[in-house]
Amino acid sequence: MRTSSLDPIDLPSWRWKPCLDYAVKELNRFDLHDYVIDPEFLEKEAITGSKSNKYIAKTATWACKTEKLRQIRAACVQAGSLSSVLNLVISPLSIYDLPFFGADFVSLASGHLIALDFQPVLKADSKHTFYIWDRLVPLCKKWSSLLPSGGKIPDAAKQYFSPGFLWSRLPLGPEGDRLISEVVFRAFKEYLDLYLEFVDMAPRVSITRSNSLFEGQRGYTRYRAENDPARGMLSRFYGKEWTNAYIHKVLFDL
């Protein structure tokens, strides 16, 4: 049983392990500290499925923090052939003018959902992260040209996506597997590498600016908590009470 959020995650047959392994390796350039999480949320298991086809659903959380990053956390789910999920979010401290980093990789019985972005918290503010898009947008164009589109983005969510939002839906089977290994994984590495480069360079901002960023971050986490698409799946596995606490106390706890 894991006792720390920094302990390695062991999920047999988990599709997205290479992505988390790469993120952990790259994050080790910083001085990582344990991000304290209640033990009941570090790992959770349940037996689910039909009477004739039962399987174990397991959720595990990896998390840490650094001098500039308030919370780095990966929510990892493996539930037989039904789902395999990595939700990685990096939340900066508000004394640095940085966007959130977000990677949502979801494998379901219907296909794979891929979302990668640097998510702004003050999108209407032209000063917020304006220096990032010239570097991020070319990456998005490069990799999105090799992937099918993910479809329309809900209007309410658009304020939290950047011009570099990479969004795709992939089919199950050999073609989807090929795109994950040859395109998605490489795109993930380049997005994360660029984000950590900006973290390295980020200077502190004024108290007034920090207060504005903090309110923007609270709005972002509130929106994500209220609209988390994993709520239904996790509720089926573990019940509504545990799921609601996990979303508000761990995933989006600001």
Image (cartoon, rainbow, N blue to C red):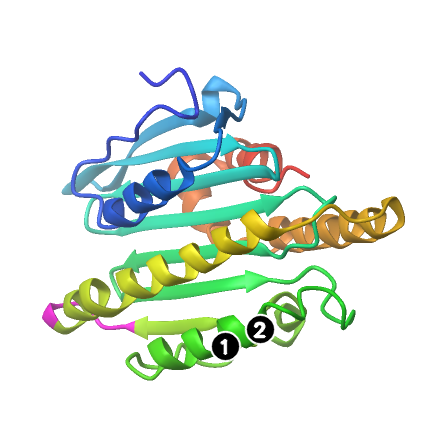
Is 238 positioned to the left or the right of 81 in the image? right
Whole-percent x, y for residue 95 in the image = 74, 44
106 to 65, vertically: above or below: below
Tell me the crowding category of disc 2: few under 14, some 14 to 19, or many 20 or more residues within 10 angstroms, Cα based.
Answer: some
Is 59 positioned to the left or the right of 129 in the image? left
Query: From which residue to which does the magenta span run?
Result: 170-174
Tell me the crowding category of disc 1: few under 14, some 14 to 19, or many 20 or more residues within 10 angstroms, Cα based.
Answer: some
Whole-percent x, y for residue 82 in the image = 25, 51
Callout 2–callout 1 Cβ contact below 8 Å: yes
Q: Main secondary structure of the magenta part?
A: loop
Q: CA distance from mark 2 to mark 1?
A: 6 Å
Mark number for residue 137?
A: 1
Q: Secondary structure at mark 2?
A: helix
- Residue depicted at 71% across the width and 69% down the height: 123
Mark number for residue 161?
A: none
Q: Is 117 one of the magenta-colored residues?
A: no
Question: Is residue 200 at least partly visible in the picture?
Answer: yes
Three-letter amino acid code at the position of disc 2 = Trp
Is 199 positioned to the left or the right of 115 in the image? right
Three-letter amino acid code at the position of disc 1 = Val
Question: Is residue 162 at least partly visible in the picture?
Answer: no
Position of the C terminus by quadrant = top right
34 to 134, vertically: above or below: above
Read off the residue under disc 2. Answer: 133
- Residue depicted at 43% across the width and 25% down the height: 5
